[in-house]
Amino acid sequence: MPDDQSPTGRHTQKGVVSPGSLNPNLRRIRKKPWRLEDYTSGIQKGDRVTLAKAITLIESTRREHQALAQQIIEACLPMSGQSVRIGITGTPGVGKSTFIEAFGLHVLKEGRKLAVLAVDPTSQVTQGSILGDKTRMEQLAHQENAFIRPSPAGESLGGVARKTREAIILCEAAGYDTILIETVGVGQSETAVHSMTDFFLLLLLPGAGDELQGIKRGIVEMADLAVVNKADGERLPLAKQAKQEYRNAMHLFPPKESEWVTRVEICSATTGMGIPEVWKDIQAYQEQTRTNGYFEHNRRAQARYWLHETINRELRQLFFNHETVRSQLEEVERQVMNGQQSSFHAAEALLQAFREQK
C-alpha cells in the first residue's frame, strides 16, 4: 500500500477529509480564528457579515466568546453614539413589523443607514424562538443600507435581549445612524427598551376607549409619539377619532423632563400614509432635545443605569454560583415552602454565608 493512502484508498495527507466523508475529493480547510482586529476593521468598514458575527459573540454564553466580545465593544465604543435610537412597541396585532418595514424604507430614502434589532419572544417551555423578522420584513431585508438582527429574548427582563445595548454600540460603529429596537410588547420590556433609546414610539390600533384603558399608564407616559396604525379603508374615520381621543388623554400626563409634548399621528403601514410625518416628528424631537441639552443628558443617565444593571446581574450570578449557597439553597427552599422559616430570614442566612466564605 502506498504511504500516502489509507486502507480505504483515501489520501491521509494533511488537508484531506476523514474516511467518513461523502466526498473524498473535498479537502478540509481549517479556518483561522478571528482576531480582535478582524472584527473591528470589518465593523468599521460596515461589513454586515462581520457585524452579525460580532453580535453572535455578544449573545454567546461561552467564557472565551464573552472575553473577546467585551474587547470588541470597548474598541468600537469611540466610534459609536452618532445615531438616533428609536424604541418601538405596541400590543400584538398592531402591525409592528409591517410598520417598521414601511418606516425603514422611508428612512432609507432619506439617505440614512438603518439597523433593526428585533427581539423575539422565547418559549419558556421549549426555549425556542421564532426569529421571523427577516421574513416579515422581506423588502427591508434586501436593502443594502439596512441590517436586521432578530435576537431571542431569553429569560431577560420582559423579553428584552440582555445584550441589545452592546449590539447598538456595534451597529453605530458600523455606520448605522438610525437604530430601531422592537419590543415583544409583553409588559416590562418597554421599560428596558426605554432605558436604551432616545425616542419611544407607541403603536396603537383604531378604536380608543377600551384600547386606551388596556395599556399600562407607565407605557403611555414613556411614549414620545403615539401612532394609530391601520388607518386605511373603513378604519380611517375610526383612526381619526382615536387620534383625537388619544391626544386628549395625553394632556392628563405630567410634563416630560425633555420638555417635549407627546404627539399623536395616524398612519397606514400598508399604504404608506402618515409615515413621512412620523419621521418628521422624530427629527423635531432630536432638534428640540439637542438644543435644550436633554438628548446628551439622557444618554449619560442611560449609561449609568446600565452600569448598575450590569453590576446587579454579575453579583446575582456570583451569589447563585457560590459553592456554599449552591449546597444550601435546595434545603433552604424546602424549609421556606414548608413554612419552617420565613423567606426574609432564609435570604439573610444565605447572604451571610456568602459574605463569610472567603
Image (tube, rainbow, N blue to C red):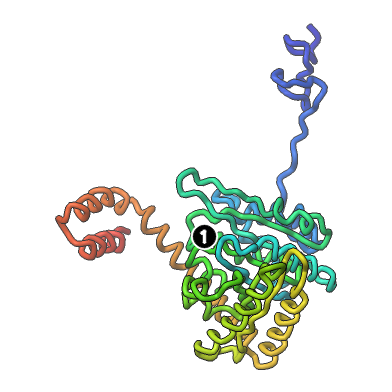
Q: Is residue 68 visible?
A: no
For image coordinates 35% across by 54% down, the residue present is 322
Q: Is residue 173 above or below residue 317?
A: below
For image coordinates 65% across by 93% down, the residue present is 292
Left or right? Give the position of 194 relative to 332. right
Q: Quadrant of residue 283?
A: bottom right
For image coordinates 77% across by 26% down, the residue present is 14
Query: Which residue was labeled with disc 1?
Result: 159
- Name the residue at the front extreme: 234
Q: Residue 329, how many percent across, how many down?
A: 28, 52
Choose between 87 and 3: the one closer to the eye. Answer: 87
- Crowding near the residue tagged with mark 1, few <14, some 14–19, many ≥20 C-alpha atoms within 10 Å: many
Left or right? Give the position of 148 relative to 57. right
Q: Is residue 132 above or below residue 18?
A: below
Q: Is residue 344 visible?
A: yes
Image quarter of the N terminus: top right
Q: Residue 232, how many percent across, how many down?
A: 71, 68
SS for callout 1: helix
For image coordinates 75% across by 65% down, the residue present is 102
